[in-house]
């Protein structure tokens, strides 16, 4: 048991979220308990500002689409150069309005860009939303939105 005697927890798996708390959390956006996970310590090999600009463009579109999607999920890709792409996804728990979802995702996007500049593979999880990007593609069958 990782957290004995704790009354609250959030577990994100690749396909689901498990959350428990002894106080009500439905309708409450949780961006306080963010967890950062670097699946690779390697940089993208790009100067950070151009790579980060592409990452920001990708997540501007993906977060907007996730906030509007009935499945509370969106994924996409954007070219870094002629032969490499950044792939990303955004997801939220679904009990929020479109605006609250977009704000939740935007906050963790800013966290990602502040902490993880130039990283190849990053996941950021909160109790309410999830953000992931990788260079190269993570191996899931996803609908991908191409961002130009």
Image: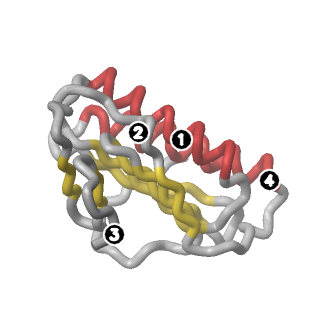
Quick one: label 3 or label 4, which is nearer the N terminus? 3
Q: Which residue is mark 1?
A: 109
Discs 2, 3 touching: Cβ within 8 Å: no
Up/down of 30 relative to 100, above or below: below
> For the residue labelled by badge 2, is the local secondary structure a helix, a strand or a loop?
helix
Q: Nearer the viewer, mark 3 or mark 4?
A: 3
Are there few (<14), some (14-19), or many (20+) residues within 10 Å of tag 2?
A: many
Are there few (<14), some (14-19), or many (20+) residues within 10 Å of tag 4?
A: some
Up/down of 92 relative to 27, above or below: below
Q: Nearer the viewer, mark 2 or mark 1?
A: 1
Discs 4, 1 touching: Cβ within 8 Å: no
> For the residue labelled by badge 3, is the local secondary structure a helix, a strand or a loop?
loop
Q: Which mark is residue 63?
A: 2
Quick one: label 2 or label 3, which is nearer the N terminus? 3
Quarter of the image with the N terminus in it: bottom left
Quick one: label 2 or label 1, which is nearer the N terminus? 2
Quick one: label 4 or label 2, which is nearer the N terminus? 4
Q: Which residue is mark 4?
A: 48
Q: Nearer the viewer, mark 2 or mark 3?
A: 3
Q: Which residue is mark 3?
A: 2
Q: Quadrant of residue 5?
A: bottom left
Quick one: label 3 or label 1, which is nearer the N terminus? 3
Q: Cα distance, mark 3 to mark 1?
A: 28 Å
Q: Is residue 146 visible?
A: no
Which residue does the image show at 27% across and 25% down from the upper left?
98
Which residue does the image show at 22% across and 39% down from the upper left?
69
Discs 2, 1 touching: Cβ within 8 Å: yes
Q: Nearer the viewer, mark 3 or mark 1?
A: 3
Which residue does the image show at 50% across and 40% down from the upper left?
108
């Amino acid at each position: 048991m990782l957290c004995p005697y704790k009354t609250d927890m959030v577990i994100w798996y690749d396909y689901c979220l498990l959350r428990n708390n002894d106080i009500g959390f439905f309708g409450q956006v949780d961006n306080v308990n963010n967890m950062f996970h670097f699946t690779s310590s390697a940089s993208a090999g790009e100067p950070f500002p151009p790579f980060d600009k592409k990452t920001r463009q990708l997540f501007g579109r993906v977060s907007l689409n996730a906030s509007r999607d009935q499945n509370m999920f969106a994924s996409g890709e954007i070219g870094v150069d002629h032969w490499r792409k950044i792939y990303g996804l955004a997801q939220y728990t679904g009990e929020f309005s479109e605006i609250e979802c977009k704000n939740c995702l935007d906050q963790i996007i800013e966290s990602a860009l502040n902490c993880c500049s130039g990283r190849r593979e990053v996941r950021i999880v909160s109790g309410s939303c999830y953000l992931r990007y990788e260079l190269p593609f993570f191996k899931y069958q996803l609908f991908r939105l191409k961002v130009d």
